[in-house]
């Protein structure tokens, strides 16, 4: 979501005549987009912001803006901590910076935010629902990004058509809980309805979506993924913890057994589906035995990717107010190691089974002089070939596998 926000702001700033520069010290304008879901992310943001102070002192005309989840409804404390920051922007709220540039730097900002979309590329993100209504006890997102608000299907379809005209071939629909899309719209429209509308746009080749909540993954969405040729068979479905007591204190709203049943349904209805997930270890009060339930879930379901993190307290959350972060850091680190080691073995075996198979790969660009792209299941694939163009879809036979990527040659 932050990547999508940054792309949109970049597009608006280009509309003003500004251009990107690599050096933050030489830039006339620096925008720091922040994430505070975890403590290490917040620490990194604070460190980066602090490092900008000398360049602001040397060049008082430099504009520094802070945006993203670090910025809440009230900015008094941030203004005291970082008095050299000119503008504070909550997520998706670009107006404070645009207005500042108009009032203090003489920019003509009329219309610069009209029809702003992501910067053109082969694959891009489209936010379709902002905010979150779940209020999981560990999560700061509802307090920083607000309650759920869906964009209309017409608006999203129009943006997609605009992006297609700029060369985009793959879109990823974004939301904190993307499969709760539409519950606040008239007419009982949902994510499945949006899939069907977008699938009719001829020039779009692939449709992806992030991130789902188990409680909102209903049958119509599952059936649409299976039925529609452009919706990719890859689902990110965070379970966060494998133990029922921990899930209850997290306020996740489902049990281990219900999550497993949902996974079974998805695998039964969608052929060749790949699954990824998110997991927190060391949540308040989690015992070794309770953690084992998470490890068992990883080993039983065999996800293609696991995003794991150690729990860190977020000020203002339910867990911060009512619970104690009592799992020692060394225990959290050990549990992360167990998860990562187990997952590496699992995905090594999964990917090894893909050797000599052929996949359609949408070429996104180059990394270290090698073309790369992804198949429908979101597998990163590097190619041996040089006679390839960005945006091309090619058939690739896999000749090498690893836990983190595949390698192949065009056929």
Image: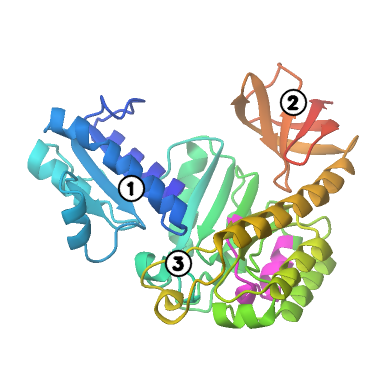
Q: Which residue is mark 3?
A: 313
* Residue matched to label 1: 46
Can you tell which quarter of the image residue 252 is in?
A: bottom right
Please, is residue 355 above or below residue 231 in the view?
above
Give, as a single range, the part of the protein colored magenta: 209-225
Is 324 or 315 nearer to us in this picture? Answer: 324
Give the spatial CA distance, label 3 vs label 1.
17 Å
Label 3: which secondary element:
loop
| Depth order, front residue of 121/82 | 82
Q: Quadrant of residue 108?
A: top left
Residue 230 location (% of width, % of height): 68, 51
Q: Which residue is mark 2?
A: 383
Instruction: Give the label, 2 or 3, closer to the camera.
Output: 3
The spot of residue 382 in percent (x, y) is: 72, 29
* Cα–Cα gap, marks 2 and 3: 42 Å
Which mark is first along the chain, 2 or 1? Answer: 1
Residue 251, position in %: x, y? 55, 80
Q: Determine which quarter of the picture holds residue 119.
A: top left
- Secondary structure of the residue carrying tag 2 is strand
Earlier along the polypeptide chain: callout 2 or callout 3? 3
Inspect this view and state whether residue 111 appears.
yes
Q: CA distance from mark 1 to mark 2?
A: 39 Å
What is the image's colouring?
A: rainbow
Q: Looking at the image, is mark 3 or mark 1 earlier in the sequence?
A: 1
């Amino acid at each position: 979501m932050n990547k999508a926000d940054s792309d949109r702001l970049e597009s608006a700033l280009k509309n003003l005549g500004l251009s990107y520069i690599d050096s933050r010290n030489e830039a006339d304008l620096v925008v720091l987009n922040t994430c505070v879901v975890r403590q290490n992310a917040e620490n990194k943001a604070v460190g980066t912001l602090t490092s900008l102070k000398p360049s602001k002192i040397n060049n008082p005309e430099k504009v520094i803006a802070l945006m993203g989840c670090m910025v809440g409804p009230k900015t008094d404390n941030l203004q005291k901590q970082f008095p050299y920051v000119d503008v504070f922007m909550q997520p998706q709220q670009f107006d404070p910076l645009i207005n500042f540039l108009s009032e203090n730097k003489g920019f003509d900002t009329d219309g610069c935010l009209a029809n702003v979309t992501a910067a053109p590329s082969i694959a891009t993100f489209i936010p379709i629902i902002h905010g979150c209504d779940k209020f999981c006890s560990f999560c700061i997102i509802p307090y920083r990004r607000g309650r759920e608000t869906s964009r209309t299907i017409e608006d999203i379809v129009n943006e997609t058509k605009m992006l297609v005209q700029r060369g985009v071939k793959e879109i990823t629909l974004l939301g904190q809980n993307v499969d709760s899309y539409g519950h606040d719209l008239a007419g009982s429209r949902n994510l499945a309805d949006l899939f069907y509308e977008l699938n009719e746009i001829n020039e779009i080749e692939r449709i992806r979506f992030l991130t789902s909540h188990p409680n909102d993954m209903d049958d119509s969405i599952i059936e649409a993924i299976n039925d529609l040729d452009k919706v990719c068979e890859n689902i990110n479905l965070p379970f966060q913890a494998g133990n029922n007591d921990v899930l209850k204190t997290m306020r996740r709203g489902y049990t281990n057994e219900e999550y497993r049943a949902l996974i079974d349904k998805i695998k039964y209805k969608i052929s060749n589906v790949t699954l990824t997930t998110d997991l927190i270890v060391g949540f308040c009060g989690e015992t070794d035995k309770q953690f084992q339930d998470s490890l068992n879930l990883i080993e039983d379901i065999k996800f293609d990717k696991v995003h794991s993190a150690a729990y860190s307290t977020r000020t203002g959350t339910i867990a911060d107010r009512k619970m104690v972060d009592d799992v020692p850091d060394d225990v959290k680190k050990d549990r992360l190691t167990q998860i990562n080691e187990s997952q590496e073995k699992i995905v090594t075996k999964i990917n090894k089974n893909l050797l000599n198979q052929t996949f359609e790969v949408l070429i996104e660009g180059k990394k270290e002089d090698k073309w790369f792209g992804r198949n429908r299941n979101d597998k990163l694939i590097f190619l041996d070939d040089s006679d390839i163009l960005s945006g091309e879809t090619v058939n690739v036979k896999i000749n090498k596998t690893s836990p983190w990527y595949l390698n192949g040659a065009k056929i």
